[in-house]
Amino acid sequence: MSKPLRVGVAGLGTVGAEVVRLLARQGDLIASRCGRRIEVVAVSARDRLRDRGLALAGIDWRDDALGLAGDPRIDVVCELIGGADGVAHDLVGAALGAGKEVVTANKALLAHHGTALAEAAESKGVALGFEAAVAGGIPIIKALREGFAANRIERVFGILNGTCNFILTAMRDNRREFRKALAEAQKLGYAESDPTFDIEGVDTAHKLAILASVAFGTPVDFAGVHVEGITQVGLIDIDFARELGFHIKLLGVARVTEHGLEQRVHPCMVPIAHPIAHVDGSFNAVVVEGDFADRNMAVGRGAGAGPTASAVVADLIDIARRQRLPAFNVPVADLKALPRASMDRHRGAYYVRFTVVDRPGVMADMTAAFRDAQVSIEALIQRGRNPGDTVPVVMTTHDTEEAALGRALARIAALKSTREPPRMIRIEQF
Ligand code: HSE
């Protein structure tokens, strides 16, 4: 058997502790698959005294994570601290600079600094593994880089945040109030340390920017992602969606259009007939559309200790087996930037909900706004009778350009009979 791969783990939170546990428990299995053992030789975390239920005897403890980067006894630095900047960034930069392989689960880091870090790894001929950064336990980076390598990717999209999917499912199925569902997701260890990253769509955007880069061979462009979270989705929308034949999911969608690279994260109406509508709870799903492979959907746990640790260790196993691929699928010098496609040019169907006073003529004013913006209405629901008081009015549109819909909504928002800002949810077509 070759000599062991020696790993330094930085960060012993939910994921870091599970990586140490997994490597201990599956040591023999992994060794038989790699032809060598993977050994944790050093760890670093903030609080040495915390009981994590880990057997750390014989493993070096470092108070300063940065010390791992220069340690000649370490082959791979496993960064599980998190955060786009600060210690995580310093450590990964220093480790790559010192010619060490790096494995990280840090999507924020990759979303903000991915291209530069990939360049640093390439210049030293070492791996930068980040399977765990996208969709937890689903091996989607590996699938894109290897299984779909023969395809031109046309669109990649998915449910990329377990917390949001858990919340939306609990709201729909258990009529759970938003905050309560979020607290439950936090308790189960799905949420980010700052859960606003989950519910505001930022975590999904981090993952989407990474996926888009691997799928389309473009530099990571997090700033080019259009981001909306789930805080505006009401139970009322979930109910109307079901009535119209949809479930609401927070999707990240990336595709190359005639206007450039479209990267968007927002709540979507997805047809109940599509399997992604049934990916519930903390599960994630990633759909890859390739020109030869056609449409594939992978489903798995997108968050939590076990699935994320599984993905981290998969990267370590690749390194132990001496399998190295360009981080973003092609060498950094061959990544090609594309213009950002503006959301104004996005074409699709829309769900809109208005809160208006129930009195004669209001519907005529609303439909006139649609007519003048040249937006075609597909369906309309107005139920209930509440003379002089408010009622919800829901419409769906045929395909239209978002800028045109925006003109209609602005005009309706300004009507005297409108009582709340219109709510819009895009309908995703498959
Ligand atoms: N907060 C993330 C989620 C964890 O809820 O999916 C995995 O990145």
Image (spheres, grey):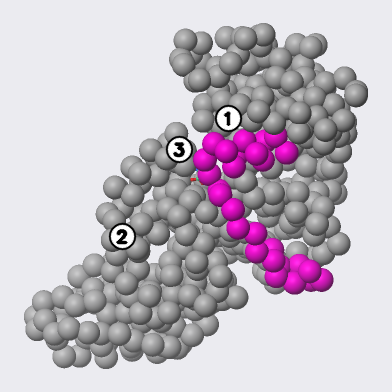
Q: Is residue 346 above or below residue 227?
A: below
At label 3, counting other C-alpha atoms closer than 10 Å, the crowd grade (few under 14, some 14-19, many 20 or more) is some
Task: Kindly identify the residue that appears in the image at 24 percent across and 76 percent down.
Answer: 392
Q: Residues within 10 Å of mark 2 (few under 14, many from 20)?
A: few
Is the CB of mark 3 within 8 Å of ligand 1? no
1 or 2: tag closer to the N-terminus: 1
The residue under label 3 is 189
Q: Position of residue 242 (x, y in %)?
A: 38, 75
Foreground mark, 1 or 3, reads 1
User: Magenta stretch?
Assistant: 288-314
Kind of residue at disc 3: Gly
Write down the residue under mark 1.
18
Mark 1 burial class by Cα count in 10 Å: few <14, some 14-19, many 20+: many
The location of residue 75, given as percent across then percent down, is 80, 20
Q: Residue at x 48, y 75 (%)?
A: 272
The residue wearing badge 2 is: 174
Indicate the quadrant containing the C terminus: top left, top right, bottom left or bottom right: bottom right
